[in-house]
Amino acid sequence: MSPSQRLLEFIDQRAKGLGFDNVDGNQDLFESGILDSFSLVDLISFVESEYALRVPDADIHPANFRTIVEIDRYLRVHGA
Amino acid sequence: MTPKECFIVGSGMYVPDTVIDNATIAPVLGILPEQIYRSSGIHRRRWAGSGTPTSALACTALERAMGDAGIKTGDIDYLLFGTMTPDRYIPGSACSVQKALGMSEIPCLDIRAACCNALYGIQLARALITSGTASVVALCFAEIQSAWLDLSPKSATISMLFGDGASALIVSADQNAGALEILDILLATNGSYVDDLGIRSPGTAFPIDPGAADTAECDNSLPRMVGQSVILQASRRMTAACERVLERNGMTIGDIHWIAPHQANANLLLQLARNLRFREGSGIISVLDEYGNTGSASMGMALDVLRHSAGIRPNDYVLLPAFAAGFTWGAGLCRASTST
């Protein structure tokens, strides 16, 4: 399973719980309300355990986690 | 001979009478009342009347703590005051408490570690007592944050959180019934985040030009918070501090009965409990629902509620996690004395 698929499952699960039918890869997850400050912590915990990564403090920036495409890009760059 | 042990032997709290519930503040901030509760766990908060000095709240809390400890003002030989909202820029508000309560000419010191003030205060009190410098230390923590809040939609996520209130602790080498022994305090800071949480002005790095109406300059005098940075760092740092304190005392989270944290946000407290794998149930003391985030005062309020609850038993262990502007953070460890 590619990083994108596992990530999609995590985001989809959260989005469905909030009443979203589906999430576009380029949809702003913060603006749409799918992610907030607290669920970002959950997302990063998921990413760290799922891909055996440690996301450094300096990388905790919305630019890295704003869309599924950006998160996937971050994971690929960091070897997930 | 200097004492090796020291105890929290008295506690008290005070909040102003005026209740501001979510239904009152939400329309002003352009959000829904349920949004406030959902994102913070807060239903209402107290606000002091305009012109009330922060020290007035602290005085009442301290009088209650002295009553709880069974001591008089003359027994106190050191006074520490933690606040982000002092009466005056200079001198510290501890001086106002000393005068108002007619205390003798003891050392009075203000602490400026924001929401970690209680943890810093307890560490300092312990050091003062175990070094023989003082025998009974009074700690006041108070905030009147309502005076600083920007009540406009652009500041909704900050302004919905904060309330006014005060707490006080009495720390002594001699324990009494209900005492909490202070076993360990761990504190740390990373100044890279100074601008992610706090208020810049008035400060020499951000001088105020009285003639300027520049928006950015005006914004410097308002509370600022980079929510994602704060929540993520708070979640990580408080968890790590608790784990380190447990480890260096040869304990695990299974040994902990209570957590009396800084009352930042109910969702953050749940996240902390989850990270630590703390037992389900009512072990985390929260006063957020009623009083909101009272800054410096909040951990002392949680400790006061815990000390006067029926649930605490002799030898119960209590964790005290906190996170604050700076960023600075830490965790404390206490044990209910056998004479509880």
Image (cartoon, rainbow, N blue to C red):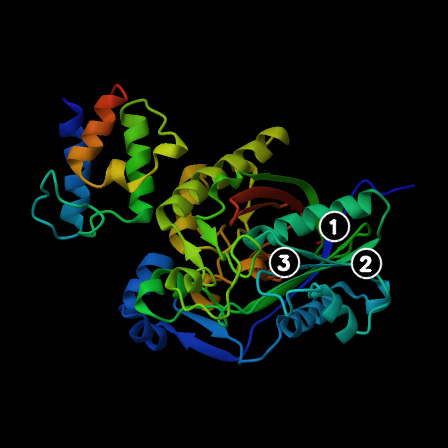
Residue lying at 53% horizontally and 46% vertically, measured from the top left: B326
Report crowding for label 3: few under 14, some 14 to 19, many 20 or more residues within 10 A (C-alpha).
Answer: many
Residue closer to the observer: B243 or A55: A55
Q: Earlier in the sequence, mark 1 or mark 2?
A: 2
Whether residues under marks 1 and 2 lie with C-beta atoms below 8 angstroms apart, the answer is: no
Could you tell whether B159 is left or right of B87 in the image? left
Residue lying at 18% horizontally and 25% vertically, measured from the top left: A3
Residue B297 versus residue A3 in the image, above or below: below
Same chain assignment for discs 1 and 2 = yes
Could you tell whether B109 is left or right of B113 in the image? right
Q: Secondary structure at mark 2?
A: loop
Query: How many angstroms separate mark 2 from mark 3 (CA)?
Result: 27 Å
Q: On the image, which quarter does residue B304 sit in?
A: bottom right
Q: Any mark on residue B107, and which? A: 2
Could you tell whether A31 is left or right of B2 in the image? left
Whether residues under marks 3 and 1 lie with C-beta atoms below 8 angstroms apart, the answer is: no
Q: In the image, residue B130 lies at what x, y percent? A: 81, 43
Q: Which residue is mark 1?
A: B125
Q: Which quadrant does the N terminus of chain B fall into?
A: top right
Q: Secondary structure at mark 3?
A: helix
Q: Which quadrant does the C terminus of chain B fall into?
A: bottom right
Whether residues under marks 2 and 3 lie with C-beta atoms below 8 angstroms apart, the answer is: no
Residue lying at 79% horizontally and 66% vertically, measured from the top left: B70
Q: Nearer the viewer, mark 2 or mark 3?
A: 2
Q: On the image, which quarter does residue B76 sit in?
A: bottom right
Residue lying at 27% horizontally and 70% vertically, measured from the top left: B30
Query: How many angstroms separate mark 1 from mark 2 (CA)?
Result: 12 Å
| Number of numbered discs overlaid on the protein picture | 3
Q: Which residue is mark 3?
A: B307
